[in-house]
Amino acid sequence: MDEHATASGSDDVRLAQGPAASAVVDGRGVLVAWSTAARELLGYEATEAVGRMAARLLGEPLPADVDRHCAEREAWSGLIRLRHRDGSRLRACLEARSLLDAVGNALWVLTATVAPPSSADAASESGEPDTSVLKRWALEQLPLPMGLYDRRGVCIAANAAMARAMGTSESGRLGLRVGHDEHGRPFKGMEGLADAVEQVWRSGRTVSRETLFRAPGEERAHGWMTWFYPVVDPAGRVCAVSGAGGDASEQVRARQRLSVLNEAGVRIGTTLDVGHTADELAEVGTDHFADFVVVDLLDSVLSGGEAERVPSVGGLLFRRAAQRSVLPGCPEAVVPIGVLHSYHAESPPGRALAAGRALREPVDYRTLGMWATGSPERARSIRTHGIHSMMVVPLRARGVTLGLALFCRHRTQEPFEEDDLRLAEELGARAAVWVDNARRYTRERAIALALQESLLPDCSSRQTGVETAFRYLPSDPGVGIGGDWFDVIPLSGARVALVVGDVVGHGIEASATMGRLCTAVRTLADVDLAPDELLTQLDDLVLRLDRQAMTEGAAQNWKGDGLGEVGATCLYAIYDPVSRRCSMARAGHPEPALVTRDGAVRFLDLPAGPPLGLGGLPFEVAEFELPAGSVLAFYTDGLLAGRDLDEGRDVLRDLLVGSPARPLEDTCDRAVHALLPDRRADDAALLLVRTQQLSADQVVTWELPAEPRAAARARDLACEKLADWRLDDAAFAAELIVSELVTNAIRYGRPPIHLRLIRDATLVCEVSDASSTAPHLRRARVFDEGGRGLFIVAQLTQRWGSRHTYSGKTIWAEVPLQEEAAVSVGSAAG
């Protein structure tokens, strides 16, 4: 259209720029008020305009959305052609706002100004809208929510998409702060938007925010990515902030699921405790997408057994491992932690287990009926707390079903969706692996502990030469069982072997190595080897184990530093309660502490000796005379863990002061409490030994001549002494044993020959000579003249053997006393 055309009857655009023209229209569309500017704009006097229909002043039909705005009493603005009194048409910017009169009738205030001329007017004449109209329509019809905000973050304009996204009208958002409702409260999930607008005002830069928001009337929340950018004037000054949002629900939910899974990877499986791992799964569930979570594990799994790969639902027993709720005290729970229970086959858990896959379903009358069939109290809890949606996820790892996790919603209004089910399945799969790892570790730890306990000394076995007390504390579950051990081994002649050792490493391998070494020490102790000789034999054994481990590692292509290495430390001591002499040797083990009867404490100066497994280096023996009533403290380095060696020994020394006057059990408790922390990175062992001495009336020794008649003399001496000790029941067996041992010494040994009797829990008969040749038991043939002596000795004794000494050898035999003696002697005589 020609901007300068003014001919009467033709369409033109008036260029007069004056004040805004105003008019008021009632609910019927009749003009009821007319301003002077309106008269100047359209040429009508007030008397001509008031009372006529406002539609007669239009030069073209109103846009289609005006009716909707009128019906909802929403403000409207846009470019429209108006008809002048002279018949010409002009383009004006028209705004309509709703008012109410005193009785509540709707009135509309119309404001019009002449639209600025543009080159698009020519195109308008051909029926095409001009550029300004297109821009306005594009903004109004933009499907992305957009808003304009002032310095306070208050909305001063919003398009229809923004109104729909917020669940309000366009005018309803005006005057409200970004992300807030009409009461000034921030919408849930949009708490940070006001700060984002403030940041744009301060920095002049675009800021983005990701939110999850559910508008009123919507069933589910939407994820929004909102960008706030500055609106600047020609001088570059920020005069407003515009916000545009896009529905990014899928991306937001995917990122949230990934975030939950990443968080679960950090929070679940922090320990190797099955119950704690189950509780971590329940905690992550209630923190992110569920209101109530329970984790039930099969009782067979928790008891250390293997679960079935496809368990039958009927008869399955579960143990409640964990439960969490958003409500204090977890009131939805019916089954307490640790209690056995079961599920009905038709209940959701039963059907999920039977199908072997996760199940999601709303809680309706049918579901309640299934719960009520198997567990009415569970159905009551579901109704009471308004649980409306649930998911059941079987916990399966390595093809084995370990239990199930149940996720419920009652406070959250939205039901679980497929995205939630996928998240729960992924969480369940990961948690099942962690639970299985914890279960396997718990089982291995139980095996290692059982092995350790089976090798500890028997408290019920009384030792005449010593009084003992001990403590063994394994390391924390996350570290693994170590290889600490100790033992108290009875030897011949009322002597006692005391041993303490520590295998390098943790786990089943360390426990197995410890078991081998402990068994080897007992076997070598039976041979009555000296401490240095025993450690030499033990060192050879460790070297063989090391070579075996290296060979197996090479066959299996093991890799890693130190793989196949076996090492240990050990201290071996022999205490003789007759002479009160104690001989010791150590292989890299800490020195024991000695507490004398006056309360003085010192650490014995023993040659260090190399750790077991180095090979080729000698071990040295140190011998001490210990007063009766002294206390020896043997320990592993785990007892002093976390402290400097000297500091730890000082603490142990202070604890042992005065221990001869205290019960050994009390001293053990004090030491463990003072030295060991709550969390231990290594096993700790402590063995306390109070030495005793056999009285002179319990031991008698004779030197015998190396002649045949010495055997008769020995029998007479033994019988007389047994009569003094009132051991007449053992006299017959003792007489035969003494006669045979003395005869062998005279025939095969060298003088001097000594006979010693020891009255203890058993009667010990010992014959010593200067020869190193040891006898051995054999079965004589029918026509042999000899060879039956040691066989008779073996039948009459509880046990017998020989040991080498520095001057020769000693053959010994133990005769049971009282009732046991009568039974054995009668059997041998028969």
Image (spheres, helix red, strand yellow):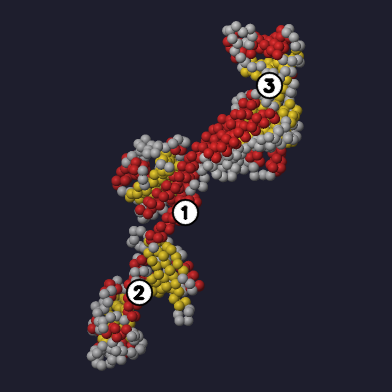
Identity, as a three-letter code, of the amino acid under mark 1: Asn
Question: In the figure, is residue 153 to the left or right of 577?
Answer: left
Judging by the rendered image, the residue that carries numbered circle 2 is 139
Residue 803 marker: 3
Q: Residue 536: x, y in percent?
A: 67, 31
What quarter of the picture does the N terminus occupy?
A: bottom left
Q: Residue 270: x, y in percent?
A: 51, 47
Q: Residues within 10 Å of mark 3 (few under 14, many from 20)?
A: some
Of 602 and 308, the residue lying toward us: 308
At horizontal 66% and vertical 10% (from top left) the residue drawn is 736
Mark toward the viewer: 2 or 3: 3
At horizontal 67% and vertical 44% (from top left) the residue drawn is 643
Q: Is residue 262 above or below residue 561?
A: below
Q: Is residue 546 above or below residue 73?
A: above
Mark toward the viewer: 2 or 1: 1
Q: Is residue 219 visible?
A: yes
SS assignment at label 2: helix
Q: Residue 17: x, y in percent?
A: 35, 89
Q: Residues within 10 Å of mark 1 (few under 14, many from 20)?
A: few
Q: Residue 515: x, y in percent?
A: 58, 32
At horizontal 35% and vertical 49% (from top left) the residue drawn is 360
- Tell which circle, 2 or 3, labels the residue nearer the N-terminal end: 2
Q: Report if the CB atoms under discs 1 and 3 are less than 8 Å apart.
A: no
Report the Cα–Cα distance between label 2 and label 3.
107 Å
Judging by the rendered image, the residue that carries numbered circle 1 is 262
Report the Cα–Cα distance between label 2 and label 1.
40 Å
SS assignment at label 3: strand
Question: In the figure, is residue 425 to the left or right of 573?
Answer: left
Identity, as a three-letter code, of the amino acid under mark 2: Leu
SS assignment at label 1: helix
